[in-house]
Amino acid sequence: MKRLFKYFFLLSAVVVIFSSCGKNNNTGKMIPSDALFVARVDIKSIESKLPLDEIKQSVWFKQSIADPSVPEWRKKILENPSASGIDLDDGLTFFVTVNSGQNYIVAEGKIKNEKDFEQFNKNFDSSQTIQKEGGINLLGLKDKSILGWNDNYFAYVTSAPENSYKDFKWNDTTNLQPVNPVNNSAGLSAFCKSLFSLKSDSSLAGNDKFNALLKENGDIHAWQNNEALVKSSSSMSMLSMLKLDAFTKDNIITYTVNFENGKIAIDQNAYMSKELSDVLRKYEGPINMDMIKNIPSQNVIGLLAFNFKPEGIKELIKLTGADGLVNTYAQQMGFSLDDISKATNGDFLLAFSDLKIPKTSVNKNDSSEDNSEYDNFKPEFNYIFSVGIGDKASFQKIINVLKKTGSQMGADSLVNKYVMNDKTFAFGSSVDFANQYLAGKSNNKYDFSGDFSGHPFGFFLDIHKILSEFSDFKSIDSSDRAMLNQSLNTWNNIICDGGDFKNNAFKFHTEINLVNKDTNSLKQLNNYFNEIYQLNKAEKDENTARLDSLLVPPPTDTVKVK
């Protein structure tokens, strides 16, 4: 993968900063239908939110232009990316796929000026010559990558063969390179050429879900084929004994990302097989908001809440064909699948609150052996795990099994920290905290409560509160403190809700919220990473200067002794 990042560094910068996306069938015609992951970036929209002139003011950009070691042609492309010959108004697509056991990473787009495009790519490796095969121009590039193009479109292809390092000599520390690296140039060329002749039923051009994704208004569109991912993973072969088709068939997740004022908004569609979708739809329900308001703290830092009837768990097990085996094992433990399906009403909650970080600790640069204060450092927080009770007798059977198992594992003190009544089970950081929750007298309201109401799923993480606990941490040096302050001024929280079924997909919406609500999130991210870059560089320069001072020899006494 290292060679990929080396080669595509410049091209990625062009994509992220300058290009735009055409939302039509042409986007998918050179992408295999079983591609594992696809990302399409509408940088025309992104550039309207983060203009090139603002990027040029970044320290990293100025230093790249001023760096004498950077070739002039790269500086030219950074200053004027259209000089690459790429049609930036048509956009660029990245995808990952597997073909004949090889992993391929590809970048595709449209050509605007073939002469400029050819010269741009010859700069990578001037020793290579262009080969023409069947109307496709092929140019070998450094690090075992290849470029193919015709009159309109291009494709950069690189591969990462799984067996290229199988003969690696770990005992040879002088040259950490593969002994027999795989030469896959022929395979790269064949695969690259095949992309230009994909039939419609073998590409994503005719895929309704993919085309629906591209029609959504967004700065970035992403496609994740979980069925193909599972099939391509050798580590999943052991699961072939189970009937997992219902879980993996037609399992596609799409993402649409928008950079808005004060937040990054992500809309997600989860497509599944009809068999699996029917079960999930039948047994999901809205979150019980009483479980959230009963949390005995206003300082919640993280929360996960959802509703899924346990009858659905039984149906999901049946889809695997393992219900008989599971039921036999459960009966040996003292309960049955029917007990599982009746035990709860589907309400689940996990919440963390009241985070406290000890404000004293040794400095991270302290070389003394007595680090007991640091070794004893432990964050303090409260947590609650709650389940709504359906049939109390069935629920008690499961509790008894958990207590027995916990006793056998020597975890009696842990499993006995729960409390329950006729309607709710609560397991907390302490029995007192769990009892406060069970009493239901808190009636707390949170900013995210309105987002969760009426949905089957909700997630919340307060990044700002977590970072704030480190603000007075004595072991943080000045450089880390400056980075922490920059993060505190940038990041707020993450809120995700959804699970509703619409248009044949389960819908989710995520917002990564920033502190500044008035400025576009893309501009804020540009400023944030620019500041972090400067802080890192300053720290590196300071460490280099300190090291140089230690290496300077002491002055020599030049006075002659008579």
Image: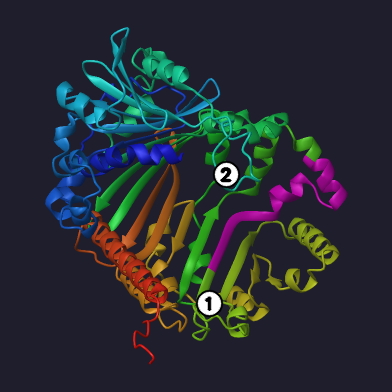
Q: Is residue 88 visible?
A: no
Give whichever of discs 2 and 1 has the lower sequence position: 2
For the residues bearing labels 2 and 1, Cβ distance under 8 angstroms:
no
Instruction: Name the image quarter holding residue 465.
Output: bottom left
Which residue is most to the right? 332
Q: Nearer the viewer, residue 410 or 443?
A: 410
Residue 80 drawn at (x, y percent): 13, 40
Q: Nearer the viewer, residue 444 or 298?
A: 298
Kindly identify the residue that appears in the image at 30 percent across and 62 percent down.
533
- 398 part of magenta stretch: no
Residue 87 drawn at (x, y percent): 18, 29
Kindly identify the residue that appears in the image at 35 percent across and 19 percent down.
206
Q: Is residue 396 left or right of residue 193?
A: right
- 345 part of magenta stretch: yes
Q: Determine the CA span between mark 2 and mark 1.
A: 29 Å
Q: Please give the residue where the numbered disc 2 appears in the rendered image.
A: 283
Q: SS for tag 2?
A: helix
Kindly identify the residue that appears in the image at 81 percent across and 47 percent down.
330
Q: Nearer the viewer, residue 161 or 437?
A: 161
Mark 2 or mark 1, whichever is nearer to me: 1
Which residue is most to the top? 134
- Establish if 297 lies above or below 425: below
Residue 244 drawn at (x, y percent): 64, 31
- Establish if 297 lies above or below 392: below
Q: Please give the residue where the numbered disc 1 appears in the rendered image.
A: 296
Q: Nearer the viewer, residue 305 or 310?
A: 305
Q: Is residue 364 visible?
A: yes
Query: What are the residue bounds of the magenta stretch?
Result: 326-351
